[in-house]
Image (cartoon, helix red, strand yellow):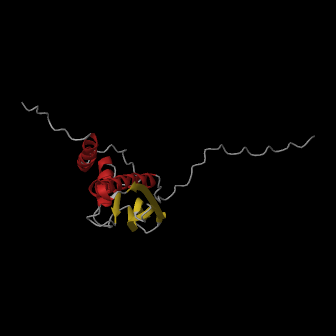
Amino acid sequence: MLNRTPLRMPADSRTWLRWPLMLIMTAMLCACGFHLRASANLPFKSLFMTFAPSSPLGIELKRNILASGNTQVLPTAEGAEAILEVLGETQEKVILTTNSSGRASEYMLYYRLTFRVTDAEKKELLPATLITLKRDISYNSSQELSKGAEEVLLYRDMRSDMVQQVLRRLAALKTAQPTQPEQSTATPAAAPATAVPAK
């Protein structure tokens, strides 16, 4: 009688299959938009941003600002107390190290944003500011699919980090409100005593 034993996958194969599954599950959780974020307490009531309508960074930044309930994001610059002007937004992938065959074994991912903030009268509240974020990622041609998913997750993480850094800079701004003359609380100096001539 034949002894039938169940076929079992090697432990290494199960481990290799587990990583892509974990990456896919993580991507699904991130895609649902569940992130704990600090409330954006901005010093102006309305803001216009020059991001493209389909910009993921602009969409996430707008969502965080509106969640605070203190500031409106207007579709045009008309009536906005502050204007966030995007001067540049780039993503870059640079080879960091190579293996013995001369192929890339590690990359550095860069995410850069340059912007400035002005008020309704075009007075500069924040000069041109560059924020640079970077993450390193290893590469293996035998795991191209999982590494591609990891790269997408890293860029998404950098975008969320970028949103928080922009919010912190916006919250630290002081709007150009006309300054009121300070009321002096010092008591007026007493009049000098008049000397009484000696008799």
Q: Is residue 73 visible?
A: no
Q: Residue at x 34, y 49 (%)?
A: 70
- Is 56 located above or below residue 15 in the figure? below
Q: Nearer the viewer, residue 4 or 187?
A: 4
- Give residue 41's position: percent from left, percent from top: 39, 48
The residue depicted at 32 percent of the width and 51 percent of the height is: 64
**143 above or below 123?**
above
Q: Residue furthest right?
A: 199
Task: Estimate the x, y position of residue 133 in percent, counting from the top left.
Answer: 43, 57
The vertical placement of 102 against 13, above or below, is below
Image coordinates of residue 66 in percent, x first then y, are 30, 51
Give the quarter of the image for residue 147.
Answer: bottom left
Image quadrant holding the C terminus, namely: top right
- Left or right placement of residue 114 versus residue 11 in this view: right
Question: Residue 139, position in %: x, y?
Answer: 37, 57
Which quadrant does the N terminus fall into?
top left
The tally of labels here is 0
Which residue is more in the foreground, 88 or 156?
156
Residue at the extreme front of the image, as rendered: 1
Does residue 135 appear anywhere in the picture?
yes
